[in-house]
């Protein structure tokens, strides 16, 4: 695990640790404690500080207090076993080099996961899936507009997440709230078909804008939508969007990090696995 700098390539800082030498030892202790206690993501943030201090004290007795930064990094990397590059930055340098979201100041002693498209942006593990889900929904609407959509209608939805000891299904409104979607139901409890977005007549032929191309390449739902319209010149078709906790490699890493208690201090809430079906109606190409 290298100590990062401004010249570190994006592929070598997929995950960054923002920490001083002392806080880095705390990260190593937390990683060890979470593995020893086998905690779940929801309990990871509840590890008593006394436990952490106990691990730190035990580590100090074995010499960690006198270890170099490189050696502590090696220990932490061995504990986490992420299989992807991790880089260390002190707090001031991280603030200068990267973006962490509006109003978020990176905390020393915290881990952040690289945005899969914006490689200079980093997201706390506990927020990663929810941030990506909302951005995917926004990319969906922007792509629809660029492809010449006239209207998007929400047709149906299903949620595959369960909760509680009895394994009851998470309901659609709960999943919708995480994505910022508005849903309506009739008196029987059935989802009401509603207009999701409407667009004016396009001035350009169907296209994938450069800023959305990485999304299309990364996400199969958006890739299928773009291909069907640009190659098939469809006037209407159904578009399916799927949202789940592990959205790509970054999602896998973020879930693992949150499960090990390596968060930026926020509470962990898993993204509900949901599937949303939309009807897309497009403007005819000759109008």
Image: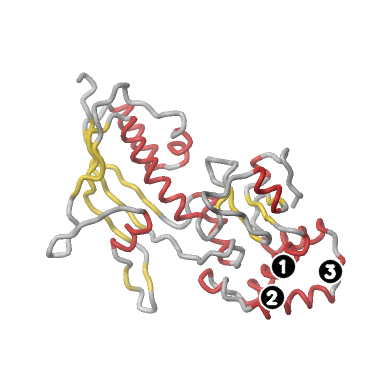
Q: Name the residue under label 1.
A: 26
Label count reads 3
State the SS at label 2: helix
Q: How far apart are marks 2 and 1 (CA)?
A: 8 Å
Does 230 appear above or below 65?
A: above
Using residue 2 as the reference point, say whether residue 125 is left or right of it: left
**Residue 119: where, in percent of width, then height?**
58, 41
State the SS at label 3: helix
Which colouring convention does the figure follow? secondary structure
| Front residue of this view, candidates 51 and 280 | 51
Q: Which residue is drawn at 69% across and 75% down?
A: 52
Residue found at the far left of this picture: 187
Q: Which residue is drawn at 56% across and 54% down?
A: 104
Quadrant assignment, res 65: bottom right
**Residue 107: where, in percent of width, then height?**
64, 59
Category of crowding for the residue at label 1, using alpha-carbon neighbours closer than 10 angstroms: few (below 14), some (14–19), many (at least 20): many
Does 207 appear above or below 188?
A: above
Q: Mark 2 points at which residue?
A: 52
Using residue 43 as the reference point, say whether residue 198 is left or right of it: left
**Residue 66: where, in percent of width, then height?**
87, 66
Residue found at the far front of this picture: 103
Does 249 appear above or below 44?
A: above
| Front residue of this view, candidates 166 and 91 | 91
Asked if the residues shown at circle 2 and circle 1 are in contact, with their CB atoms under 8 angstroms apart, the answer is yes
The answer to which of marks 1 and 3 sits earlier in the sequence is 1
Q: Which mark is residue 65?
A: 3
Q: Distance between the residues labelled 2 and 3?
A: 15 Å
Residue found at the far top of this picture: 286
State the SS at label 1: helix
């Amino acid at each position: 695990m290298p100590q990062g700098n401004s010249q570190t390539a994006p592929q070598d800082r997929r995950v960054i640790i923002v920490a001083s030498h002392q806080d880095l030892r705390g990260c190593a202790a937390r990683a060890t404690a979470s593995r020893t206690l086998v905690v779940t993501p929801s309990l990871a943030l509840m590890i008593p500080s006394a436990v952490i201090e106990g691990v730190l004290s035990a580590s100090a007795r074995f010499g960690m207090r006198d270890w170099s930064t490189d050696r502590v990094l090696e220990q932490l990397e061995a504990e986490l076993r992420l299989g992807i590059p991790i880089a260390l930055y002190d707090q001031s340098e991280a603030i200068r080099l990267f973006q962490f979201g509006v109003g978020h100041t990176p905390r020393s002693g915290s881990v952040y996961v690289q945005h899969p498209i914006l490689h200079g942006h980093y997201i706390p593990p506990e927020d990663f899936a929810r941030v990506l889900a909302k951005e995917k929904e926004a990319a969906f609407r922007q792509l629809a507009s660029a492809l010449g959509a006239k209207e998007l209608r929400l047709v149906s939805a299903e949620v595959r997440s369960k909760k509680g000891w009895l394994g009851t299904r998470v309901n659609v409104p709960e999943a919708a709230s995480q994505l910022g979607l508005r849903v309506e139901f009739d008196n029987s409890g059935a989802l009401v078909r509603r207009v999701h977005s409407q667009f004016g007549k396009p001035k350009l032929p169907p296209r994938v804008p450069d800023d959305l191309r990485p999304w299309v390449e990364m996400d199969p739902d958006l890739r299928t939508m773009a291909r069907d319209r640009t190659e098939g010149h469809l006037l209407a078709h159904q578009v399916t969007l799927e949202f789940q906790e592990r959205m790509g490699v970054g999602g896998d890493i973020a879930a693992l990090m949150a499960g090990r208690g390596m968060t930026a201090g926020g509470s962990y809430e898993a993204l509900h696995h949901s599937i949303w079906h939309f009807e897309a109606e497009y403007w005819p190409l000759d109008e």
